[in-house]
Amino acid sequence: MDYRIGTWAELAPRLVAVAAGREAADLVVRNVRLVNVQTREVLDGWQVAVAGGRFAYVGPDAGHCIGDATEIVDGGGRYLIPGLCDGHMHIESGMLTPAEFAAAVIPHGTTTMFTDPHEIANVLGLAGVRMMHDEALMQPVSIYTQMPSCAPSAPGLETTGFEISAEDVAEAMAWPGIVGLGEMMNFPGVIGGDPQMLAEMAATMQAGKTVGGHYASPDKGAAFSAYVAGGAADDHEGTAEADALARVRNGMRSMMRLGSAWYDVESQITAVTEKGLDPRNFILCTDDCMAETLVKDGHMDRVVRHAIACGCDPLVALQMATINTATHFGLERELGSIAPGRRADMILTSDLRDLPIEQVIARGVTVAKEGAITVDCPHFDWPDSVRRTVKLGKTLTGDDFGIPAPDGANTVTAKVIGVVENQAPTKALTAELPVQEGLVEATGETCQIALVERHRGTGGVTNGFVSGFGYKGRMAMASTVAHDSHHMIVVGTDRDTMALAANRLGEVGGGVTVWKDGAELALVELPIAGLMSDSPAAEVAAKAGAMMQAMRDCGCTLNNAYMQHSLLALVVIPELRISDLGLVDVTAFELTDLFETGA
């Protein structure tokens, strides 16, 4: 089915005729309490008329817009709110293709998404971005694409499957679904005046589009000012009220995220609820949501409910998930509110606080009702080449995961990546570890971590240490989702088991696997770029749920620890990470030795 919608200009003659009563509307919704996010008020008894997928009339009585063929929806006195917008997200984090992601979130009231496919950009380059973009445009809801800015995210600290150039960014700005530049993660490059980063931002602004931000540093002094001066218009990396204040006081939009593992709304929304700042510059988003979260807990409806539970006025929370987002991307005249000319995206709900999503209408068509999708989400024809991206170069053995100790050492002081529950940043820790037969042994809370090169088949393995997962026994977990360069991350307590897990993903073409005592406990196959499955969300969610249970069976007690696992190679978020080039000190943006000097 073709879900394309005409522009406001193209449809204006009919919209005018319907609003004036000269022509009949396609759809009229009446007997509702309309939530107007333009004015932050509830209008009892208002009605809306839709023509060509856009609102034609919004007012007290749409009777003059009704004809013999007009569909009538009786709202039963319920609230009519705009369709929800996700201001920053990565579809790949759901382990789903755009079509399957859309099918999962439409019943939750999400009708617009602003997506950054920088995961697939690291694996397949501009061609992968184009595939994501093209499938996004096929959907019954609006999925806008931000052209990825940083592949690699930190040049010189990691090696990606492909690199994105300033020329690639300039080319993509002409694509129909590109709304701006994806999160500019290389903030040290911007601050240092890196020509490529500045050229990418300039190409975006010259195209009249929005530059996404990503400033993962606690420094709010001159460095932060320099980053904002470069053109970043928003930021979702804040974790405290002070972060939100710094963003909005410098003219940025503060994007507050609630994903599967990121809980950053409660700590920042006090800037509005307690300090009383103007809420127009605050936006709600998810960033990263796994399929299991989407199926069990929801999407943007979950975020809005959470913001309300944190003390936010329901109408303000809805603005943060609708009109604020649309305005930020220059689309206030296109979507984000129930007003003439806008895309007819709306939700019927019986309660503004609990926000049950009872009927979802997108572009004037009912797309979900009582939690079930009612339309098809078309699939792109993904070529076979995207299913052959895991190249290990050899069969790995336990020896590949051995960590030689300095000559003559009986113990070492090792640098350890410390996982922080529900947050993206890690801690730079140290641990005293024993040496046996010349190899450093991980003990107790400290596990081994390895980054296995998987794009070019070099056979390379970088080894290190991590703590915080709580794993016990002989176990290993491997994933080809390894933000952002997406090699393979393997975490384990036993070297031979780590090799088994890594080889398994090479065999199936990518995904996530958990092993214990020599046997596989769970497997999530992700054949598309080693990042996504084109299976239905419920199937992927069930396998992801089994994977999370397997992690618990291995001793892990962290909330949604898979997300922490998959971000251990993200070399643009402090403090300590691992890449194919070595251990990375992200506070200094440089490679660092695994052992403390003098160990």
Image (cartoon, grey):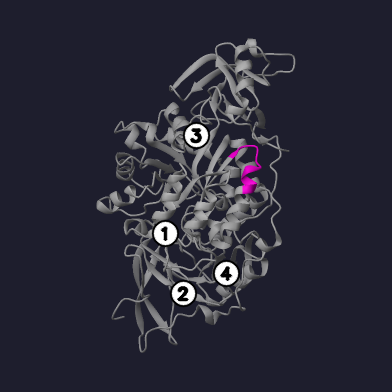
For the residues labelled 3 and 2, the Cα–Cα distance comes to 46 Å
In the image, which is nearer the foreground, mark 4 or mark 3?
3
In the image, which is nearer the foreground, mark 4 or mark 1?
1
Residue corresponding to mark 1? 196
Residue farthest toward the left in the current orientation of the protein: 221
Q: Give coordinates of residue 329: x percent, y percent.
A: 47, 38
Amino acid tagged 1: Gln
Residue corresponding to mark 4? 455
Q: Is residue 236 magenta?
A: no
Instruction: Using the image, determine if residue 83 lies above or below residue 561.
Output: above
Amino acid tagged 4: His
Q: Which disc number belongs to residue 331?
A: 3
Instruction: Give the side of residue 330 with respect to residue 192, left or right.
Output: right
Q: Give coordinates of residue 322: x percent, y percent.
A: 49, 32
| Residue contact at pointers 3 and 2, CB within 8 angstroms | no
Residue 140: name its quadrant.
top right
Pick whichever of labels 3 and 2 is earlier in the sequence: 3
Q: For the point 48% across and 80% down, which residue is it?
A: 402
Q: For the point 44% across and 73% down, which residue is it?
A: 581
In the image, which is nearer the foreground, mark 1 or mark 3?
1
Pick whichever of labels 1 and 3 is earlier in the sequence: 1
Amino acid tagged 3: Leu
Instruction: Give the side of residue 271 with respect to residue 473, left or right.
Output: left
Q: Where does the C terminus fall, quadrant-wise?
A: bottom left
For the residues labelled 4 and 3, the Cα–Cα distance comes to 38 Å
Q: Which disc number belongs to residue 463?
A: 2
Q: Viewer-proximal residue, 508 or 88? A: 88
Give the crowd class for mark 2: few <14, some 14-19, many >=20 residues within 10 Å.
many
**Total number of numbered labels?**
4
For the residues labelled 2 and 4, the Cα–Cα distance comes to 18 Å
Segment colored magenta: 134-142
